[in-house]
Image (cartoon, rainbow, N blue to C red):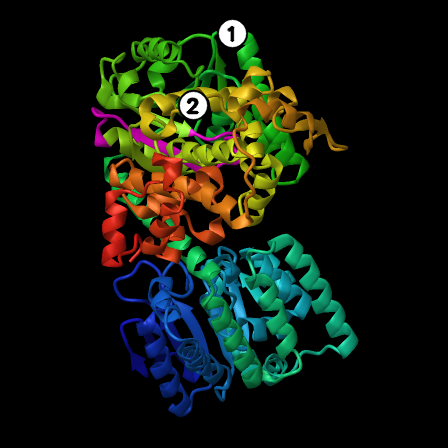
Amino acid sequence: MIYEGKAITVKEIEGSIAQLNFDLDGESVNKFNRLTIEELRAATDKLKSAKDIKGLVVTSSKDCFIVGADITEFTELFAGPEEELIASNLAANSIFSDIEDLPFPTVTAINGIALGGGFEMCLSTDYRVMSTKAKVGLPEVKLGIFPGFGGTVRLSRLIGADNAIEWICGTKEYKAEAALKFCAVDAVVGPDALFDAAVDLIKQANNGKVDYKARREEKTSKLKLNPLESMMVFETAKGFVAGQAGPHYPAPVEAIKVMQKHAGMSRDKAIEVEAKGFAKMAKTSVSASLIGLFLNDQELKKKAKDLEPLAGEVKQAAVLGAGIMGGGVAYQSALKGTPIIMKDIAQAGIDLGLSEAKKLLVKRVDKKRMTADKMADVLNKITPALSYGDFNSVDLVVEAVVENPKVKGIVLAEVEDQVREDTILTTNTSTISVNLLAKSLKRPENFCGMHFFNPVHMMPLVEVIRGEKTSEETIATTVAYAKAMGKTPVVVNDCPGFLVNRVLFPYFGGFIGLVRDGADFQRVDKIMEKFGWPMGPAYLLDVVGMDTGKHAGEVMADGFPDRMKYDSATAIDVMFDAGRYGQKTDKGFYQYELDRKGKQKKVADESVYDMLKPIVEKQEEFSDEQIIERMMIPLCIETVRCLEDGIVETPAEADMGLIFGIGFPPFRGGALRYIDSMGVDKFCEMADKYADLGALYQPTAGMRDMAKAGKKYFG
């Protein structure tokens, strides 16, 4: 044994070839944590001094190769001085460069996922042999950074600058054949042949059949671009990528700038440029927020996994109500492999639901994301029904009928009599109390909320709402089904609006107050879109529908009258009373016309200002900052209330609910991380400027205590 550690071993195998194997003790996957990097340094030093070694094969004993860096450890490093981060990166890079400089040929056998630092490890060897089951990629810009273990340097020299830009800025994971086509790997073989193929490549290098020294020279030299070619590649890419990424995500463009800067440098100087650029991005608030989201997502996945032992298997699902929403649920379930019965009381409803599913599937076929045969398979998993004939085989029911408590109560009681005693019943409601609906049932322990967001196929969030009598098995099974549908489930407790709508309506309250006090709703939209929201509040209300907004607003007012009830008519009331429900009626705060592709586009309607005049009480002038503060403060405080009231269990779940449910700007990390970014004390001071606006702007006692203690929601 040449080296033996807890993450890495190095031993000599046939023909004086060494095998460096990654197998991180106590973990299901390999990752670059401090231990692994320290051992890689020690193992590389042993290889440098080893005698009579004629080659190195790098392998993994786990199903994946290396998933990347352990971001939980690196966040601590990111919080330190920029100089320390640069030094740390250069120290890690010296290991990869030493592997690249070993006095014998080197090959990586990529048996599974190799992402980020894992793929950068692969790039440090002379050759890469890839299993047909493996995937590779450099997805770091999703975290607001870019490759920092030599990835921008080696990949650009290996596959060309234009292709490297595509890989790094596009963040895709590439299957074996695609990676081979790009020349990012040198051979693709079946899993059983992987190790032998890697050893054979070492032998070919030693026999002179392949020139590993020429390959190494190519990777460690300058980019082969003349000044004109360099300008064309990088300047064109910067403009295109900036347009794709938008102004709030600097990492992709910064990655291109770094590649452009080090294009004329040899490896060691180029890596210094990369390390400085990496540290610059790692210190941004965008990176902190996106890494926070990644960690939040990991926490949600862990919570869902912890529930798995309690979950029942959903082999057959059903949805009641076959409209747009029911059709969307049926489509998503069938697409992800769970057969579903779609029941309605009328053939017209069935036709509408099937039409919705077919429309979505045809789009996938047109975009070549699905074959016609696969489309047929998915449609065959949707069984239309006008009766409860096959419901004795159903494991979980999604009720998606009209948003009316009496109707839902009747339908739920009816279906309960048609299913097995262990069948889970769920209600897709956005506002109606789960505890209220449970009163209609004989087995309330088998009942919970399952709130999908529209359009179902696009919105990643599902709120799983726990009632007072809901069993843990019911929650676990519903969470598992949501995951099987490709959704992110967040478990919340019952209250008016649950989490997402309870938080959204104070945000609309901020908008209502601004319009009342003389703000131009179109300007408010533009400012909030510039702040990072996908659409401003007026536009969002048009998309949601003014009838839905009014109904939900009344539910919220009944539940929280101290801060969500209005003494006089609001801008929403004006639109509703005028029959301007938004996109569904082609008129709301804006008018909607069809563009050349048949999609609705928003057009300004100046007549709306005259309609709003009766409810405008003041004519104040607002700065952009004041508009942002008046919009964001109520939303953030209500998120805190949901956490303090136990509606949502953790800050991570609260923030992820808002990002996945209402499009909270991801680069700001969520409402609670937004508060943390300025400090709870500073946030309270900001809110106090608007104390005269009422309870929506009053920080909670818990926030005051946190402000005094200097605490954060994310420690």
Q: Nearer the viewer, residue 683 or 122?
A: 683
Q: Which residue shows up at 44% across the image and 32% down it?
A: 509
Q: What is the span of residues highlighted in magenta in the rendered image?
A: 452-472
Question: Type of residue at label 2?
Answer: Ala
Residue 40: horizontal and vertical position, in percent? 37, 78
Q: Pointer 2: what residue? A: 552
Q: Quadrant of the C terminus?
A: bottom left
Q: Quadrant of residue 482?
A: top left
Whole-Å distance between the Cαs marked 1 and 2? 27 Å
Q: Pointer 1: what residue? A: 346
Q: Is residue 715 visible?
A: yes
Residue 481 vs 431, above or below: the answer is below
Residue 149 vs 599, above or below: the answer is below
SS at mark 2 in the image: helix
Taking the image as shown, residue 404 lies to the left or right of residue 358, namely: left
Residue 590: horizontal and vertical position, in percent? 65, 29
* Residue 655 falls inside the magenta stretch: no
Q: Is residue 659 visible?
A: no
Q: Quadrant of the N terminus?
A: bottom left
Mark 2 Cα within 10 Å, few/some/many (few <14, many 20+)?
many
Q: Which residue shows up at 60% across the image and 43% down it?
A: 526
Magenta span: predominant SS is: loop
Mark 1 Cα within 10 Å, few/some/many (few <14, many 20+)?
few
Q: Which residue shows up at 41% across the image and 31% down it?
A: 501
Instruction: Give whichever of discs 1 and 2 has the lower sequence position.
Output: 1
Residue 426: horizontal and vertical position, in percent? 34, 23
Mark 1 vs mark 2, foreground winner is: 2
